[in-house]
Amino acid sequence: MKKEGGTGMSLTKNTITDNTIREKANLIIKSAKHSGISFTNEERILIRERFRKRLDMWITANNDIGDINKDRMIENLEKWSSEISCNYTIGWTVSPYDLMGTYYGLEDDYNPKKIPYMKVFPINATILFYEALAGVFHCAKLLEEALTNILLHSGLNSMYNSRVNTAHKSYNEKQDHKDKNITFSEALHLYDCWFFCLLDCMYYSLGGGRHLTTFGLSKETNSRAFSGSLNHIREAVRYGLKYISFLPDFMFGYCCEKYVYDAQLRIHNVNGPAYRDPKGRIKYYIKGVEVPEYVVMQPEKISLNLILKEKNQEVKSIMLERFGVEKFVKQSKAKVIDSHIEKQGESQLLEIDLGSGERGYFAKVICPTTLKEYLLRVPKYDTLKRAIAWTFGMRANDYEPVIET
């Protein structure tokens, strides 16, 4: 690998490695035969790096919640449709159930039972595109890793997993590309945009249209046109697209709510809303917990009284973290019942007046790894050790940590 001067970043510019990846990929795609072709560790690293770089672009588009716009979404769907010579009429909805209602209101000629094998070519082309690239990733032993990477970002309610399983099953069964046909009823199902993300990341990581051999997907489009059109899907995702549903000569885009996630894939944003829906409604989340707007946007409004009055323990914990544990202890005039000085600082068992004659007991502890302070609600105890042991479901005699994690 070469390094670009002055950046300090390792860049994948090994021409020999690039060429061998493309040669192998083109051979696999052209012959559809995978036996006897393998990839070196250096080639696999390069493919993985490019895949991740492309995936980051989709994640950025998906996490941009400030610009949900159905008109811009439809505009990009129309561009995508045009580039692959689809020319479908495009509609939109904010509910997948609306798609089903529209379908069941169509004429009998569109009944999937009467047309069980009617071709809906955008989906057929998509599956064929996947199968070609999956063969290369299978030989590189990166296929399952690629699927997992996409699945991690597709969301718990995503249809992505079922769509990939459908395509992956077809690939594993080694069905003939020329005879492969998706049924009309199968095409009706919501088509998750993370599947298009998977295709774009796979194609880009192998060299893209400038280097890979162009192969046919249907009489209407080929691999180069199809891959180039995926940029419009990504932009549609930026404007709120989540699913696409296909009918003969008609296509629905599902304009959905959007979330911001942190590295642990929790809904999280300390700088603004973490949720927005197509109607403009917003919500605020920190570490996966929905909180009032002021906790995020005006944390200076958090007070001792508001923290004590908050009944939701998860919200109270976030408020306490934003307010500051040490500040809370000082303002509450907490009584120290017991304490213990450790390498990372002093832990304390505190008694706090919660108002209305109620007394609360808290263990103020310090994480040995992050050095962050936490205030844990505990029953009434006379020693800090007994209180901390209780948080672990243990008795004081059994609580003897060597290194706390």
Image (cartoon, grey):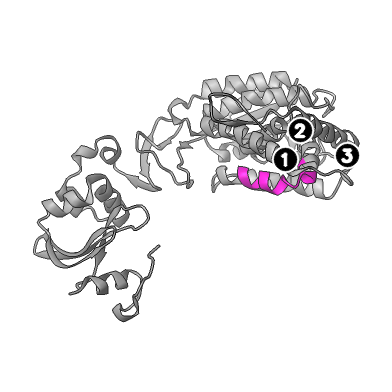
Is residue 55 shown in magenta? no
Please state which of the two labelled residues, at mark 3 or mark 2, is closer to the viewer. Answer: 2
Amino acid under disc 3: Ala
**Which dot, 1 or 3, sits closer to the camera?**
1
Q: Which mark is residue 396?
A: none
Is 392 left or right of 164, judged from the image as shown? left
Q: Check disc 3 and report the residue beneath it.
A: 32
Chief SS of the magenta region? helix
In depth, the one of 41 and 34 nearer the eye is 41
Quarter containing the C terminus: bottom left
Residue 17, which numbered label?
2
Sequence order check, earlier mark of 3 and 2: 2
Seen from the viewer's position, the closer of residues 207 and 267 is 207
Q: Are marks 3 and 2 in contact (CB under 8 Å)?
A: no
Q: CA distance from mark 1 to mark 2?
A: 7 Å
Q: Amino acid at mark 2?
A: Thr
Instruction: State the CA–CA distance, disc 1 to disc 3.
Output: 23 Å
Q: Give coordinates of residue 91: x percent, y percent.
A: 60, 26
Spatial CA span between label 3 and label 2: 22 Å
Which numbered tag is attached to residue 42? 1
Q: Is residue 330 above or below residue 394?
A: above
Residue 125 is at least partly visible in this image: no
Note whether residue 14 is visible: yes
Precedes in sequence: disc 1 or disc 3: 3
Label 2's element? helix
Look at label 1 and name its amino acid. Answer: Glu
Q: Is residue 144 magenta?
A: yes
Give the magenta-colored segment's residue range. Answer: 137-150
Pinpoint residue 188: horizontal percent, then vertical percent.
69, 39
Residue 353, image x and y in percent?
11, 61
**Label pair 1/2, CB-CB below 8 angstroms:** yes
